[in-house]
Amino acid sequence: MLIPRNPKRTNQNSPTHINWFPYYAGFSSEFVHDVLSSFTLRKEDTILDPWNGSGTTTTTAYRLGAKVIGCDINPVMVVAAKSALLEPGISPSLVPLSEEILHATDTIELSMANDPLSAWYTPSSAIELRRIHLAIWRALVNSDSPPSLHSRDISNMSTIAAFFLIALMRTARHFLAAFVGSNPTWIRTPDSPAKRVRPSKDSLFTHFRTEVRRMAGTLSAARANGLETSRQGASPTISMMSSTSLPFNSGSIKAVVSSPPYLTRIDYAVATKPELAALGMPLSEDFDTLRKSMIGTPSVRQNFLHPLLTGKTCDSFLKAVEKHHSKGSHNYYHKLFVQYFSDMSDSLKEIARLLVKKGNCVLVVQDSFYKEIHVDLAQFVIEIAQNKGLSLIDRHDFKWDRNMVRVNTRARKYRESAAAVESVICFRKD
Ligand SMILES: C[S@@+](CC[C@H](N)C(=O)[O-])C[C@H]1O[C@@H](n2cnc3c(N)ncnc32)[C@H](O)[C@@H]1O
């Protein structure tokens, strides 16, 4: 296989991937392009990204004319990945359409009852954002039923509906800057209702217009720079589902290109909490269910299974954590890491089942530290994958210094520098 370039995203938007929802841990479309170009793909071959995030794999593969499937368990990321597929030719219609959406909010009757956005917004502000949400839903998703987070509705949504929902999420996020501290992946909720933000309907609508204008601007600039309007290939399938159980036929996937959730204890459910609230997710039980089912979550499930032996490095890491003297290592962190290995085992088993014989799997992972213990994620994943019938064919390590160590001073103590190692690991199905 071609030696790939550093997988990290170099700039947010590129000729083949517009990204209105930049995501920590995303890789670049140039990297995906290199990897896909190194395979000999036939027209009928399908690529899969089971942890699709903001959709770099799906957009890049689509623009290259390949069949592609992307999955993610977080509805926010499914909407983001869909929005990235919007055809540039539609850009002139976006601003007029946003005016129609805002106009339609006049006809929407809503009561002030307990909106998820009222975790940060006063009820009267939250209701205005919800009106925009409903108007988008009625015009572009399903005029007969209220907004839902059912995987069917999210997975079947059009790219244009996704575009406006992202504009709504960006609007909802815009007014919450005061609740984000030095760690950009953590958002506080106000400690008393009086501290909630209260933008007027006018400010909210004006900002929504600004977001739509900006996003439409990016799309027309990309078009001017040569982003193609349409492809002959089939549209990507982007679905809300878990990598631990994928409903596709065995041997139906030619190659997997992906970046699984890392073992950095970053809470990605919390990182997208305002966006989930903007999509209407109640921030109680439903949010907890999603949070618990995300791989790498800092929340331990009650019923997870201890994995069968994963491998030498995994085992000695688990042992080191279990007997670490620090508070929480034995009772909490050990369980958390076992849960991660168990979820990765299930996911890699699915990947191995879905791949055709001799099919390729290219994964990008990053190392980290737990206290002074090195979290050698690449080696952990290699051991688990080998147990599932995937043979390692190549590994490339790159130093990367813009990682979460910078926002986590405690973790920095154990690193000589703020550099982390990003590894590209390449497997072939036996
Ligand atoms: C490292 S990110 C992928 C970033 C992506 N490569 C990009 O370019 O944006 C990992 C993704 O895995 C998703 N994820 C976490 N648990 C999952 C699960 N059980 N099934 C599917 N996706 C999951 C997260 O929502 C997140 O979007």
Image (cartoon, grey):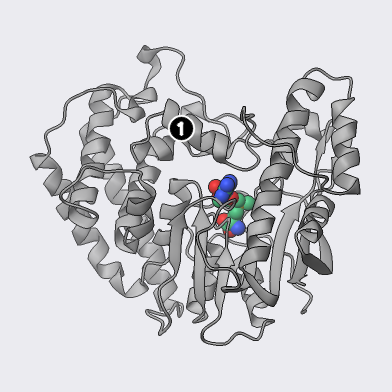
Q: Which residue is mark 1?
A: 287
Viewed as shown, does residue 284 lie left or right of 337? Answer: left
Q: Secondary structure at mark 1?
A: helix
x, y (%) of residue 171?
35, 42
> How many labels, in total?
1
**How far across and down, in percent of the image, does residue 354 sit?**
61, 67
Q: Is residue 23 visible?
A: no
Vertical placement of residue 310 versus 199, above or below: below
Who's the residue at 23% across and 66% down the image? 93
Tell me what residue is drawn at x 38 percent, y 56 percent: 155
The image quarter containing residue 296 is: top right
Residue at (89% x, 33% y) in the render: 319
Quadrant of residue 233 in the image? bottom left
Q: Is residue 151 left or right of residue 379?
A: left
**Amino acid carrying mark 1 in the image:** Phe
Q: Is residue 25 left or right of residue 15?
A: right
Q: Position of residue 353 (x, y in %)?
A: 64, 64
The answer, for residue 28, to whether it is visible in the render is: yes
Between residue 257 and residue 128, name the one nearer to us: 257
